[in-house]
Image (tube, rainbow, N blue to C red):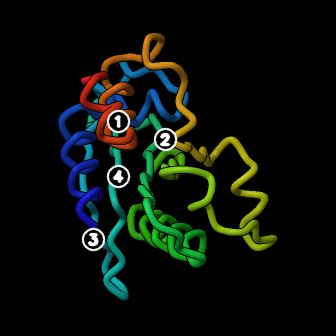
Amino acid sequence: MKTDSLFYRIFQTAPGIVLELAGASPSEAIGYEFRSVELKQTAFRIDGVLIPTQDNQNQPTYFVEVQFQRDDRLYHRFFAELFLYLAQNPNTADWRGVLIYFDRSIRPEQTPLYQQLIDSDKVQEIYLTELENLDTLSLGIRLIKLIVEPEPTSINQA
């Protein structure tokens, strides 16, 4: 999907946006690199992984999934990819999952299988259409918000 590559480029250029969306300080981005990671197995590909640099190995690794269309198997795939990554990278200090949806209608139905993880502080679900008023948002978050705005509105806001 073309939005995946757009988000990948934005997050690679400005990884602080991922941290800010996840409720962490964007200033911590200096200690991270944003990558697309292919896992050796059944060719899983995570949308993006914000990996701490060598000097910040004690910080959490952020797994990012961007969804603009409904995928009822999202949680199954996301956690399979995430835990496969952790199995292949046992020195990972901690982790956080960041699921970014266009809006709530894209979110899969709740599932008891993963609900405890989804409800924990390990996973954050973000709905781009519900981000606050543009005037109060950082430049990075406003850039992300423009992607989901209708064209007439986005042109005025840009």
* In this rendering, the label closer to the viewer, 1 or 4: 1
The kind of secondary structure element at disc 1 is helix
As rendered, which of 72 and 155 lies closer to the eye?
Answer: 155
Under circle 4, the secondary element is strand
Residue type at mark 1: give it: Ile
Classify residue 51 as left or right of residue 114: left
- Pointer 2 residue: 128
The CA distance from mark 3 to mark 4 is: 10 Å
Judging from the image, what secondary structure is the residue with disc 3 in?
Answer: strand
Circle 4 Cα neighbour tier, 10 Å, few/some/many (<14 / 14–19 / ≥20): many
Which mark is nearer the camera, 3 or 1?
A: 1
Look at label 3 and name its amino acid.
Glu
Q: Which residue is mark 3?
A: 38
- Identify the residue position indicated by label 4 in the image: 49
Discs 4, 2 touching: Cβ within 8 Å? no
- Residue at position x 35%, y 31% from top? 153
**Residue 41 percent across, percent down from the top left:** 36, 85
Q: Is residue 56 visible?
A: no
Q: What residue is drawn where x is 33% and y is 45%?
A: 51
Vertical position of residue 148 compared to residue 41: above or below: above
Q: Are marks 3 and 2 in contact (CB under 8 Å)?
A: no
Query: Which quarter of the image is occupied by the N terminus?
Result: bottom left
x then y, percent, for residue 9: 19, 46
Residue neighbourhood size for the residue with mark 2, other residues' Cα within 10 Å, grouped as few (<14), some (14–19), many (≥20): many
Please tell me which residue is depicted at 34% across the width and 60% down the height of the picture: 47
Q: Tell me if mark 1 has few (under 14), some (14-19) or many (20+) residues whose alpha carbon lies within 10 angstroms of its own.
A: some
Q: Quadrant of residue 118?
A: bottom right
Q: In whole angstroms, how far apart are the C-alphas of marks 1 and 2?
A: 8 Å
* Label 3 or label 4, whichever comes before in sequence order: 3
Q: Is residue 126 above or below residue 1?
A: above
For disc 1, the marked residue is 144
**What's under tag 2, amino acid-wise?**
Leu
